[in-house]
Image: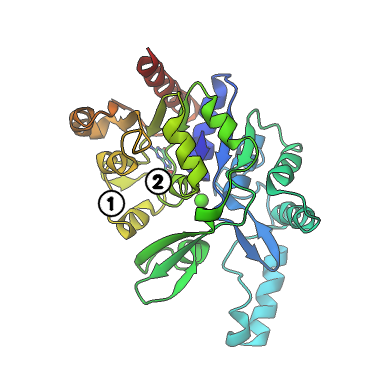
Amino acid sequence: MLAGGIGGARFLLGLRELGHDVTVIGNNGDDITLYGLRVCPDLDTVMYTLGGGSSVERGWGREAESFRVTEELTHYAAAIGADNAADVPTWFGLGDLDLATHLLRTAWLRDGVALSEVTRRLCERWPLGVRLLPATDDPVETHVTLADGRTVHFQEWWVRVHADVPATRIEFTGAATAGPAPGVIEAIVSADVVLLPPSNPVVSVGAILAIPAVAEAVRRTPAPVVGLSPVIGGAPVRGMADACLMAIGVETDAGAVAQHYGRRPTGFLDGWLVDDTDAAAVEPLRKCGIACIARPLLMSDLGATTAMAQAALDLANDLRT
Ligand code: GDP
Ligand code: CA
């Protein structure tokens, strides 16, 4: 399964219940260096969520978290004046417990350890029940050009600006020359099924597929590739994926997202699940050669999420036979 942060991680909680052997290929597009620390928000969301250490209420970061370090940084930022304070990114929530992860990751990366090995070591701490691989060991970052002409890191647009300013361009810097992390291609081409969870199609799944070797593996794997729509009734279930889709000229619509992924082998999908609300999208997609079914797609609790995962695997089985 390819995964972003919260949508991917929640779906994995359901998928894990089914007891299969799961490899998660995580998104590195959100990765950012803050205060010299390498932060991998989507990898950490998957790790903390499956490990049982994430904040249920926030969806990201650690439970029982405190923000004393951030408070202290805010005091410094206030004292040094607006110009210098621009270099103090207190808008990004780095909790005290979370910082431990970034300290260790950064220390190991500085010692020359690959991100995939760093991730493996960090995951030793958590009972994940799946194998988590970064999509790449190479540095990649998603950058966004805003309507006012500035180009900023995706996190700055998302977390600081809340995507209030429209984006005119979304660029996956480093992706075109990035290689897949060890194990990524093997996992995709030897899988029984490849799942695209209801993650952000642009900055989560799209950022992973911007790595050419990963895209190529998804196109050529003998396994059926099945995705689930993160858009229900013309809106993202959570977050601002509509702002990302608008930036790349794709309508915020369950059918339009499937068309954007496209049908293999030129595109990425064999099958697609839409919510019951979007049942009207089923026939048009079938006519385009994408096997589409409508099911309840709200991850309201573990039972509902597990049923979604089972429905995706059932569709994959139908495609295989
Ligand atoms: P992020 O990296 O934390 O933004 O998380 P992801 O990219 O993995 O997932 C974000 C997407 O998850 C958003 O576009 C949401 O619409 C979608 N999402 C969140 N909850 C649900 C849900 O219950 N059902 C569906 N179908 N999509 C959801
Ligand atoms: Ca993300």
Give the side of residue 17 with respect to residue 80, left or right.
Answer: left
* Residue at screen point 43% across, 48% down: 206
Within-10-Å neighbours for mark 2: few <14, some 14–19, many 20+: many
What secondary structure is marked by label 1?
A: loop
What secondary structure is marked by label 2?
A: loop
Residue 112, above or below 50: below
Within-10-Å neighbours for mark 1: few <14, some 14–19, many 20+: some
Residue 131, position as x, y percentages in the image: 64, 32
The amino acid pointed to by label 2 is Pro
* Residue at screen point 69% across, 69% down: 35
* Residue at screen point 33% across, 53% down: 245
Q: Which mark is residue 201?
A: 2
Viewport quadrant of the C terminus: top left
Residue 91, position as x, y percentages in the image: 56, 68
Kindly tell me whether residue 55 is visible in this rendering. no
Contact, mark 1 vs mark 2 (Cβ under 8 Å): yes
Depth check: give the residue in front, 62 or 185: 185
Depth check: give the residue in front, 6 or 293: 293
Q: What residue did someone put label 1 on?
A: 250
Residue 20, above or below 134: above
* Residue at screen point 35% across, 37% down: 229
Residue 90, position as x, y percentages in the image: 61, 70
Of marks 1 and 2, which one's residue comes earlier in the chain? 2
The amino acid pointed to by label 1 is Val
Task: Say if disc 2 is inside 8 Å of ligand 1.
Answer: yes
Give the side of residue 18 with respect to residue 145, left or right.
Answer: right
Q: Which mark is residue 313?
A: none
Give the side of residue 91 with respect to residue 145, left or right.
Answer: right
How far is mark 1 from mark 2, CA to CA?
A: 10 Å
Kindly tell me whether residue 245 is visible in this rendering. yes
Q: Residue furthest right?
A: 111
